[in-house]
């Protein structure tokens, strides 16, 4: 019996392989701490709210995907060219984004995923170009997946009254 990871962690891990076609980029998720080496993509998911009703398990998630590279060696045009490769790996119309992510998600069902916003390129105080994409997704833990912990709904133990976080 295994216990599921949080939906945020699972969603971040499912998005990482989408950037396999982008060469020479380090990819960091929220759980990786420490210094980030240029060029890099950072992926950070967070729940916005539960849909339908409280304790439904259907979450609206927001995933911030930021691309950063040094401004000491690259011009804005060079940076934007590299950024477009990253954007294309998410935006390319076939298959849909939710299907692309679902392909790599093991314990998560993705109902909808779309690019909801994009931030402009900025040169921050660390001499780095930074540009981001925000993906909004509606997800739920998949009860039929391989690694999800199976809840035992037992009247004697009143286990179905316990809220799951």
Image (cartoon, grey):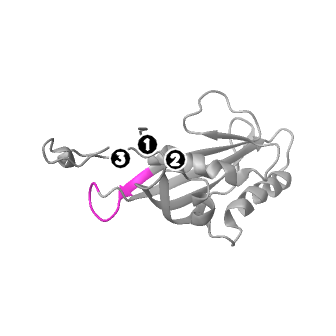
Comparing 35 with 55, the one in front is 55
Foreground tag (1 vs 3): 3
The answer to whether the residue labelled 1 contacts the one labelled 2, judged by CB atoms less than 8 Å apart, is: yes
Residue in view at x 66 percent, y 70 percent: 95
Foreground tag (1 vs 2): 1
Task: Specify whether residue 150 is painted magenta.
Answer: no
Residue 76 to residue 126: above or below: below
The quadrant in which residue 38 appears is top right
Spot the residue most to the left.
156
Position in image of residue 30 (x %, y %) = 55, 38
The image quadrant where one finds the N terminus is top left
Q: Is residue 39 left or right of residue 158?
A: right
Position in image of residue 158 (x %, y %) = 15, 44
Task: Specify whether residue 51 is painted magenta.
Answer: yes
Compute the Cα span from label 3 to label 2: 17 Å
Instruction: Say the numbered circle drawn on residue 165.
Output: none
Comparing 129 with 138, the one in front is 138
* Mark 2 Cα-neighbour bin, 10 Å: few <14, some 14–19, many ≥20: some
Instruction: Say the numbered circle drawn on residue 4.
Output: 1
Q: Secondary structure at mark 2?
A: helix
Comparing 54 with 156, the one in front is 156
- Location of mark 2 (residue): 10
Residue in view at x 49 percent, y 49 percent: 146
Q: Which badge, 1 or 2, is on the more N-terminal residue?
A: 1
* Mark 3 Cα-neighbour bin, 10 Å: few <14, some 14–19, many ≥20: few
Residue in view at x 19 percent, y 47 percent: 154
- Location of mark 3 (residue): 150
The stretch in magenta equals: 47-55
């Amino acid at each position: 019996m295994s216990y599921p990871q949080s939906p945020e962690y699972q969603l971040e891990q499912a998005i990482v392989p989408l950037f396999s076609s982008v060469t020479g980029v380090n990819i960091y998720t929220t759980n990786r701490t420490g210094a980030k080496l240029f060029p890099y993509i950072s992926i950070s998911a967070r729940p916005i709210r539960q849909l339908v009703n409280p304790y439904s398990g259907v979450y609206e998630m927001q995933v911030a995907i930021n691309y950063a590279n040094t401004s000491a060696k690259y011009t804005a045009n060079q940076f934007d060219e590299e950024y477009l490769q990253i954007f294309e790996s998410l935006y390319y119309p076939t298959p849909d984004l939710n299907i692309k992510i679902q392909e790599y998600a093991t314990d998560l069902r993705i109902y909808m995923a779309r690019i909801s916003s994009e931030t402009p390129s900025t040169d921050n105080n660390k001499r780095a170009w930074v540009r981001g994409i925000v993906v909004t997704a509606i997800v739920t833990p998949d009860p039929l997946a391989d690694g999800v912990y199976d809840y035992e709904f037992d009247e004697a133990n009143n286990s179905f009254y316990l809220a799951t976080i």
